[in-house]
Amino acid sequence: MALAVCVLFDAVGERLVRGLWARMEDAGIGSLASHTHGHHLPHISYAVLREWDLDRVHETLGNLPCHRTFSANAQGTVVFPRGRVALAVAVPAEVAIRQNLVTSALVGTGAQLHKYYRASSWIPHVSVATRTPGTLLPVAVNAISDVLPVNLTVTRAALVDTATGKLWPLPGVP
């Protein structure tokens, strides 16, 4: 179980990512549509926490400055260990600074940050497939390549319990 700080897309971006999930499922590749609780939203994670105090995390994030929406440009595919396939997204430099601000603030609450979300390790991405067998990696990559490049607009943010899909909207985009 983990708690994630996620930035979420407008309706167009959400439909596009859900369409990719459907393409994966049709090809016999598990996507976030069927992963765990099945309530996942298309997103980019700023942070994933292993341990946290929900009230402190929520209050701290609510006190951070709110920023305007931004574009995440998906121009390729990235494959992570254990067959996780994602859209590789380019984000404005200020977003990397925001992500660092968010994770620093969360660590200040006593939360335990997953190592891949430290500022020096964070790779902005949009998860598409989970546990893709090696033989199906070309299928996943080709399905994604067929729709690239795409521009995704981030419009809001939320805390998400990854075990249940429960969502706590945040007042702005940190």
Image (spheres, rainbow, N blue to C red):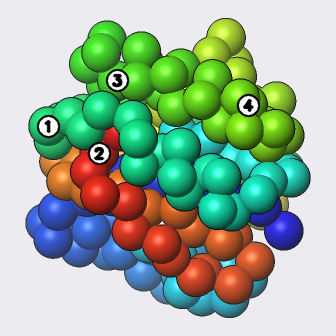
The residue type indicated by label 2 comes to Val
Q: Earlier in the sequence, mark 1 or mark 4?
A: 1
The residue lying toward the viewer, choosing from 4 and 89, is 4
Query: Does the image show residue 152?
Result: no
> Where in the figure is residue 48, as x and y percent of width and height?
69, 47
SS class of the residue under badge 3? helix
What is the x, y in percent for residue 42?
A: 41, 64
Per the image, the residue denoted by label 1 is 68
Type of amino acid under label 4:
Val
**In the figure, is residue 138 to the left or right of 108?**
left
Q: Amino acid at mark 3?
A: Val
Q: Residue at x 15, y 71 (%)?
A: 11
| Image x and y of residue 88, in percent | 45, 34
Residue drawn at the location 41% of the way across and 41% of the way down: 63
In the rendered structure, which disc, 2 or 4, sits on the residue that comes first in sequence? 4
Gap between marks 1 and 4, in whole Å?
24 Å
Q: Residue at x 84, y 68 (%)?
A: 1
Residue at image mark 3: 95
Tag 2–tag 1 contact (CB < 8 Å): yes
What residue do we see at 76% from left, 57% from top? 53
The CA span between labels 3 and 2 is 10 Å
Between residues 60 and 13, which one lies in front from this camera angle?
60
Q: Earlier in the sequence, mark 3 or mark 2?
A: 3
User: Which of the pair 138/170 is nearer the observer?
Assistant: 170
Label 2 crowd bin: few (<14), some (14–19), many (20+), radius 10 Å: many
Q: Nearer the viewer, mark 2 or mark 4?
A: 4
Q: Which mark is residue 107?
A: 4
